[in-house]
């Protein structure tokens, strides 16, 4: 066996080589670490930039050119554009909110085979019209059918894509007047007196999302029913009724806050002095919703209602039927032939009006034409007021901290033409 002996000098040289290699490795690791840190910082910076966007337009309040800074789906800052900069061609306003819509594009919210895809299609169609939030409305029907409807609608509220546009539901009936004229198109055989336990079963199926209910206050048991709804946070609206001044006041004292499509859901012939319209107009605690499509109310009615209630107490709704959004022409529904015209749905055989088809954005146009109200006021009646009534504090206005539900639009021959719709900072429609 041959022994090898290392000199002190040889050992020192070996250690130096090892130390040199170790230092090289450390430097390489440090460089990799630095590069990694820099890369991480750049990615984070990019992510922050990617999540922040700017939207320009003429502010609907006064026409001031502004840029809205949006981050994390919310409005962060309102920045006036410098003088001399190119003036935007479009207006910018909060997204529209429809509190009463029965269906759209052939889909009825009362359909028993309703699917999330159906509601998604409706939501996409309404985004094109500038509606960023709406209350799917279920009307008078059999209890089992209504429970099914709300169960199906409740599924859509959990959908990641469209759920944020569905803040709740509107139940119109079945606790309304059974009298012809006042009941409107609601089926008499399903109309009944208010029943709290029955309503709670509907709320259970809706996962607690029935946020608005239309009730006739003269029905037996209606006043205590209104009190219970008010106590649990459900907004009560008076509609399809023939209540006296005294009963309407009792309903308001119990918590009723709104009148459903005032001037409609009313008999054609009423007493000129004692009727349900005057006391609702006269009561300062009641807001009103109105259908301003030019057919459900004539010009004089709209002007009078608007002057009586003012901009702060008036809400524009569509009350659109399932045939809304479809091409003009004849359609078969439940064995009846219906005619979709430019403005409404008609029974061609009888020449009578069946229902509405205009989205809120088009109703705003008529409102401005009839009353000469400003764009600011029309937007308030179609977005800010409904959001305030329903307690939707995160939307309905352009302010820092509000959700970035926005519409960009032009005014063409007095008509509102939606160019882009944004929900929670995401562009969901662009013309």
Image: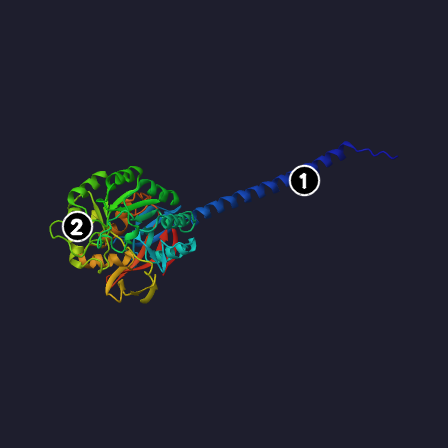
Where is residue 163? Give x, y as percent. Answer: 40, 49
Which residue is at a point 37% across and 56% down the rendered structure image? 122
Question: Could you classify mark 1 by the number of other residues whose Cα lies within 10 Å: few (under 14), some (14-19), or many (20 or more)?
Answer: few
Q: Is 15 rendered above or below residue 339?
A: above
Q: Tag count in the figure? A: 2
Point out which mark residue 21 bears: 1
Residue for badge 2: 277
Residue 312 horizontal side relative to residue 320, left or right: left
Q: Quadrant of the C terminus?
A: bottom left
Where is residue 207? Give x, y as percent. Answer: 39, 43
Q: Secondary structure at mark 1?
A: helix
Using the rendered image of the protein, determine whether residue 82 is visible from the camera's viewpoint: no
Residue 135 horizontal side relative to residue 19, left or right: left
Residue 45 horizontal side relative to residue 11, left or right: left
Q: Is 83 rendered above or below residue 209?
A: below
Q: Which picture quadrant has residue 325?
A: bottom left
Coloration mode: rainbow
Using the rendered image of the protein, determine whether residue 3 is visible from the camera's viewpoint: yes
Q: Which picture quadrant has residue 337?
A: bottom left
Where is residue 394? Give x, y as percent. Answer: 33, 44
Select label 2 or label 1 by which is in front. Answer: 2
Question: Could you classify mark 2 by the number of other residues whose Cα lies within 10 Å: few (under 14), some (14-19), or many (20 or more)?
Answer: many
């Amino acid at each position: 066996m041959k022994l090898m002996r290392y000199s002190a000098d040889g050992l020192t040289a070996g250690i130096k080589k090892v130390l040199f290699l170790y230092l090289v490795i450390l430097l390489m690791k440090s460089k990799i670490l630095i590069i990694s840190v820099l890369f991480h910082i750049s990615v984070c910076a990019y992510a922050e930039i990617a999540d922040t966007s700017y939207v320009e337009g003429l502010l609907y309040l006064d026409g001031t050119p502004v840029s809205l800074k949006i981050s994390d789906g919310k409005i962060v800052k309102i920045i006036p554009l410098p003088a001399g900069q190119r003036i935007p061609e479009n207006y910018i306003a909060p997204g529209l909110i429809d509190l009463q819509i029965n269906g759209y594009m052939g889909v009825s919210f009362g359909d028993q085979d309703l699917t999330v895809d159906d509601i998604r299609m409706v939501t996409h169609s309404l985004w094109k019209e500038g509606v960023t939030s709406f209350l799917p409305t279920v009307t008078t029907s059999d209890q089992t059918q209504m429970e099914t409807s709300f169960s199906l609608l409740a599924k859509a509220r959990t959908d990641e894509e469209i759920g944020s546009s569905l803040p709740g539901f509107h139940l119109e009936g079945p606790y309304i007047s059974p009298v012809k004229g006042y009941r409107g198109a609601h089926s008499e055989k399903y109309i009944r007196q208010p029943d709290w336990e029955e309503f709670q079963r509907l709320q259970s199926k809706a996962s607690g999302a029935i946020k608005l209910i239309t009730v006739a206050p003269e029905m037996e048991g209606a006043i205590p029913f209104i009190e219970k709804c008010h106590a649990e946070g459900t907004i009560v609206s008076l509609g399809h009724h023939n209540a006296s001044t005294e009963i309407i006041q009792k309903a308001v004292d119990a918590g009723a806050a709104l009148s459903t499509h005032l001037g409609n859901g009313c008999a054609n012939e009423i007493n000129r002095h004692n009727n349900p319209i005057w006391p609702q107009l006269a009561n300062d605690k009641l807001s009103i919703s109105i259908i301003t499509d030019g057919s459900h109310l004539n010009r004089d009615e709209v002007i009078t209602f608007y002057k009586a209630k003012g901009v702060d107490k008036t809400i524009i709704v569509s009350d659109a039927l399932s045939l809304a959004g479809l091409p003009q022409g004849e359609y078969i529904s439940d064995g009846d032939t219906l005619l979709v015209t430019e403005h409404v749905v008609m029974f061609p055989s009888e020449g009578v009006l069946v229902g509405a088809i205009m989205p809120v954005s088009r109703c705003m146009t008529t409102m401005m034409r009839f009353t000469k109200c400003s764009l600011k006021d029309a937007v308030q009646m179609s977005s800010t007021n409904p959001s305030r009534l329903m307690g939707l504090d995160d939307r309905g206005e352009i302010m820092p901290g509000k959700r970035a539900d926005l519409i960009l639009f032009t005014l063409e021959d007095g008509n509102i033409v939606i160019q882009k719709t944004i929900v929670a900072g995401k562009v969901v429609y662009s013309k």
